[in-house]
Amino acid sequence: MTKNKASQERTPQERLQEEQEHKEHVHNTKINAAAISDHLLGNMHTLHVKLHQYHWYVNGANFFTLHEKFEELYNQNEEWFDKLAERLITSGHKPASTTAEFEEYSMLSEDAINKYAQAEDMVENIIEDFRRTRELTIRAIRLAQDEGDDALEDTLIAFKNDLDKNIWMLQAFIGKEALEDDDAFDEDED
């Protein structure tokens, strides 16, 4: 009996249970690029909420600029969210796909009070979220390299490049150099 036929004979509950047990095992033993990618998807889900919140509630002198920029960023985020999940499925992985999973795996937080933040604070918050996501992405890239998953590695490198560009542009918006206040950069200097 082929693996595909065997999986079709199991109930959806059995298939989900097997998937959850596999993920639990991977996350608690030898983590791999797909497991880190679940955290990336969780971060992207949180960013979906935050970027929309900021898009709706930003105010002040930079309203028009930031309203448009936050929309651009959440659209870009959605594209990467889909690309990464589809890349994982293409590679035979089962990416996180429920709100509960995204909340469990996200390394970012969001809060309703942030809708009242000053525009510059919103931008700084997104920069920090992008940096945290970039750190996870770098870790996933290295694991994908070790695992020989060239397609996932390429997808992650392209995603990292977009994060780097967005960090630079948002830093410039608040009058800072691209790597200013970047802890990862500061650690490399030591």
Image (spheres, rainbow, N blue to C red):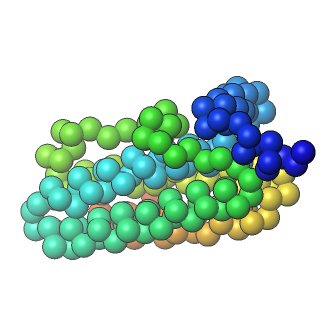
Q: Nearer the viewer, residue 131 or 101?
A: 101
Res. 27 visible in picture: no
Q: Quadrant of residue 89?
A: bottom right
Looking at the image, residue 57 lies above or below residue 168: above
Q: Is residue 163 left or right of residue 31?
A: left
Rendered location of residue 4, percent (x, y): 79, 50
Front residue of 83/159: it is 83
Whether residue 60 is visible, yes or no, is: yes
Residue 131 drawn at (x, y percent): 49, 52
Q: Residue 177's image quarter?
A: bottom left
Is 135 in front, or is 75? 75
Q: Using the image as rendered, state which of residue 46 and residue 134 is in the foreground.
A: 46
The image position of residue 77, as x and y in percent, is: 44, 62
Residue drawn at (66%, 31%) of the image: 14
Q: Is residue 72 above or below residue 152?
A: below
Residue at image point 36% right, 63% down: 74
| Labels in figure, total | 0
**Is residue 40 found left or right of 125 in the rendered image?**
right
Q: Where in the figure is residue 113, as x and y percent of width and height?
A: 18, 39
Examine the image and state in which quarter residue 153 appears: bottom right
| Residue at (24, 73) in percent of width and height | 68
Furthest residue in direction left, as rendered = 60
Residue appearing at x 78%, y 33% in the figure: 30
